[in-house]
Image (cartoon, helix red, strand yellow):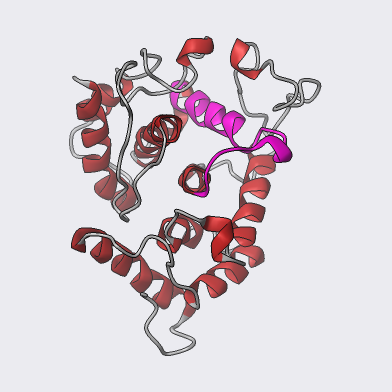
Amino acid sequence: MSYNEILTLALGLWPGARDSGAVSDPTALDELLTALGQPGALGYDCGLRSTFACFAPDEDAALTLPTGETTTSDTEARFIGHVLVTRTLLAAGLHIDQRVITAMSDTYAFSWGMRPASRDLSPLALASTLWLIALDPLSLSDRPLPMSWDVACFDDSERWDTDYRLFSHYDISERATDWAVFSSGSPVRREGCSIWTIVEPLLRLDADNRVRIALSAFSEASDTDVVAAPAAAMLERGRIAAMLQGSLGARDGGPLLN
């Protein structure tokens, strides 16, 4: 299966896996797993073999999310492509597969495991990781995550605290939740990312009071810099908006999609 076929398959399987927790043909998941540790994957050049490749090494990687946002750099596209494959596998039930758990964990190492001041991922990339937390059945557990700290990728002491290598599922969930609340406070904090990309995974975490605060803020917000989306993307945003409206009980009684 070619690189771009991997991404197409992950996006095609996603709605069913997301909504039902399963896929009709498990061999499709085996196809996704063939992309693990292949050239072109996130961190491949510095020794990592636990991430998924959706683009060839010499390709100028780019992708568009179902909600309409388009990546703006090769690194961002490779990171988000890896997340899209990982979340599909998690949603389909492979959260007990150590390969998938390690892929999820190393996603966190590149995002929430970094020193906050050195975290250079875009809001769109950070928002994509919220699905991993929403789908992780151990997101409230203090069990350590198996991050691949022994590879050269993570030797930069300015970006990572090389003396602190222990993160639990709960630690990462807390950092990501804090960011979601932070992003809900101002459009500048989520530039390039539709609010609906952030909202949908948060709807699965709304037992947390901070998440409820963020969802309430998003219900009164609107997209400001990603409005020129195709009709399919607007329909996707509308689907999520309806879910948010139902979750909050249409408190304000007005339309949520802007």
98 over 139 or under it: above or below: above
Q: Quadrant of the N terminus?
A: top left
Q: Quadrant of residue 85?
A: top left
In the rendering, at what x and y percent does residue 27 appear? Answer: 21, 26
Tell me the magenta residue range.
Answer: 99-123
114 over 30 or under it: above or below: below
Q: Nearer the viewer, residue 168 or 221?
A: 221
In magenta stretch: residue 160: no
Q: Quadrant of residue 160?
A: top right
In percent of the image, x 33 and y 49: which residue is there?
A: 18
Give the side of residue 122 with respect to residue 68, left or right.
right
Q: Nearer the viewer, residue 73 or 7?
A: 73
In the rendering, at what x and y percent does residue 91 appear? Answer: 37, 42
In the rendering, at what x and y percent does residue 63 appear? Answer: 30, 39
Give the side of residue 163 with respect to residue 91, left or right.
right
In percent of the image, x 38 and y 23: which residue is there?
A: 52
Residue at the limit of the structure toward the right, as seen here: 163
Q: Quadrant of residue 23?
A: top left
Residue at the limit of the structure toward the bottom, as seen here: 253
Q: Quadrant of the C terminus?
A: bottom left
In percent of the image, x 62 and y 61: which residue is there?
A: 181
In magenta stretch: residue 104: yes
Q: Main secondary structure of the magenta part?
A: helix
In percent of the image, x 47 and y 18: which residue is there?
A: 50
217 over 56 or under it: above or below: below
Number of numbered tags placed on the structure image: 0
Give the side of residue 80 with respect to residue 185, left or right.
left
In the rendering, at what x and y percent does residue 99 appear? Answer: 45, 21
